[in-house]
Image: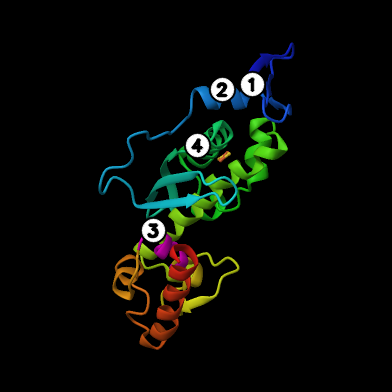
Amino acid sequence: MEAHTKTDGQAEVINQHTGERWVYSDIVKDHFFHPRNLLLEGAKEGEFDAEGMVGSPACGDVMYMWIKVNRESDRITDLKWKTFGCGSAIASTSMFSMMVTENGGMKIDDALKIRPQDVMVRLGGLPNRKIHCSVLADKAFRKAVNEYFRATAQYERVIIEGAKIIDQRLNITDKDIEEAVLEGAQTIEEVQQKLKVGVGDPDALPEIEQLIRFYKEKYYG
Ligand code: FES
């Protein structure tokens, strides 16, 4: 790829494979070259309250996010991230992390209302082909928040998105089981180590076993 600086200060990048011209705003460039809240070496044990990790089905890149929450005020006092994604993922996650933590940190419910489009507006836009990169921050954040809700036994606040609930007590869905299998859990014991699914709801066990078999077959053959 080759970058040119345009007269209005925006960068134009030409994709050498497709000849497409992508225009990046000064703000995108700034966050790409000086990412805020980046945690290159990853988090230390016990340093944060929760972690979220997602992979992009569109490109296979991965995003990690860590959050620290003030239990009394319900505000996010710290948010750090790390990605193997592209420049657009870096810039949009950097901006997202700034929005969530500025002015003393947002309340969890307000931060959950931030849409990828809101991040895009603050960045001055992204090329259409790079929109999926900005969704990674949003997804990783939701996972981290769900982990926080579970770790603090706020099960009624767990966000359920288009998934089927398998364990009614812990609000664990088929998507959570899919993720656990994707992260390497192969048996019901290993899935339970990650999720505690079915521990307090033995009626769910046959369905959980069936799902583990299904996802193992799907991803590992
Ligand atoms: S292309 Fe994978 S995150 Fe942007």
Q: Amino acid at mark 2?
A: Asp
The percent coordinates of residue 27 (x first, y second) are 62, 25
Residue at mark 4: C-beta within 8 A of ligand 1: no
In space, the residues marked 4 and 3 are separated at their CA atoms by 35 Å
Which residue position holds label 3? 183
Which residue position holds label 1? 26
On whether residue 178 falls in the magenta region, the answer is yes
Which image quadrant: the C terminus?
A: bottom left
Q: For the magenta stretch, what is the residue range? A: 177-184
Q: Quadrant of residue 9?
A: top right
In space, the residues marked 4 and 1 are separated at their CA atoms by 23 Å
Provide the secondary structure element on which disc 1 rests. Answer: helix
Magenta stretch prevailing secondary structure? helix
Provide the secondary structure element on which disc 4 rests. Answer: helix
Q: Nearer the viewer, mark 4 or mark 1?
A: 1
Q: Which label was assigned to residue 202?
A: none
The percent coordinates of residue 32 (x first, y second) are 54, 26
Residue found 53% across the figure and 45% down from its top: 137
The percent coordinates of residue 190 (x first, y second) are 30, 69
Q: Quadrant of residue 10?
A: top right
In-image side of 191 versus 121 (left or right) = left
- First in sequence: mark 4 vs mark 2: 2
